[in-house]
Amino acid sequence: MARRHLIASPKRFAPLAASAALALIGGVAVGARYEPPEKRTVAAFAQAWERGDHRAMYALLSDAARKRTSYERLQRTYREAAETLTLRRIRVGPVQQDDRVPVTLETRIFGALRGVLVIPTGKRDGQDPGVEWTAELVYPGLHRGEKLKRETTLPERASILARDGQAIAKGPERLSDLGPLAAEIAGRGGPAPEAR
């Protein structure tokens, strides 16, 4: 009985090898574009904060965070932080390491404040993970229980001097040794109003 052997020619494997190479290249391309769901959530939350869209931020909270935080509380917390900081504008950068966002807070009094905000995520039923929100997420570097606070202290008022060096007004009462006319020129001063 004669035996037959199947000898595969390279021409037969060429289409199979080409298909395998294309599948590998396609897999690498798709894998390179993959973005973890946590990173997507963190990016969406940071971008909503940049726009001042508190509704969108609240919609991205985890189930646990939504149970312990109302929309009104989240909105009030960000509004109070903005007032304390004298916030003018927020700029966020691209998400790093899935949960870190570089943030620049442009303020009227303090200038540009920069930091990295760490945004933790947690379970959100039937969706991508949600943000495990706490009040400390209003400012980079705040720890649990810390709050933003601004204190303004004014330096002692300097004396107003005439050209010859004599004091037109000096001391907390803004008095002058030159008489009542000098006091009228210098004006009366007192503590700055609370609004200032």
Image (cartoon, rainbow, N blue to C red):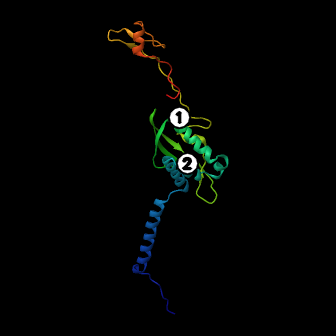
Q: Which residue is drawn at 62% across and 43% down?
A: 73
Q: Residue at x 56, y 50 (%)?
A: 57
Number of marks in the rendered image: 2
| In the depicted structure, whether residue 23 falls above or below residue 81 | below
Q: Distance between the residues labelled 2 and 1?
A: 18 Å
* Dot 1 alpha-carbon crowd within 10 angstroms: few under 14, some 14 to 19, many 20 or more: some
Q: Which mark is residue 73?
A: none
Q: 28 or 141: nearer the eye?
A: 141
Residue 43 at x, y = what percent?
Answer: 51, 51
Give the residue pinned by disc 1. Answer: 84
Residue 33 at x, y = what percent?
Answer: 46, 60
Q: Which residue lies furthest to the right in this view?
A: 67
As helix, strand or loop, the secondary structure at mark 2 comes to helix
Q: Which residue lies furthest to the left in this view?
A: 163
Three-letter amino acid code at disc 2? His
Q: Are marks 2 and 1 in contact (CB under 8 Å)?
A: no
Res. 19 in view: yes
Residue 76 at x, y = what percent?
Answer: 59, 42
Give the residue pinned by disc 2. Answer: 54
* Dot 2 alpha-carbon crowd within 10 angstroms: few under 14, some 14 to 19, many 20 or more: many
Mark toward the start of the polypeptide (2 vs 1) = 2
Q: Residue furthest bottom?
A: 1
Q: 179 or 93: nearer the eye?
A: 179
- The image quadrant that residue 28 belongs to is bottom left
Q: 149 or 174: nearer the eye?
A: 174
Q: Which residue is drawn at 46% across and 70% down?
A: 23
Residue 14 at x, y = what percent?
Answer: 41, 77
As helix, strand or loop, the secondary structure at mark 1 comes to helix
Res. 141 in view: no
**Residue 83 placement, left or right of 124:** left
Q: Which residue is drawn at 35% across and 9% down?
A: 165
Three-letter amino acid code at disc 1? Thr
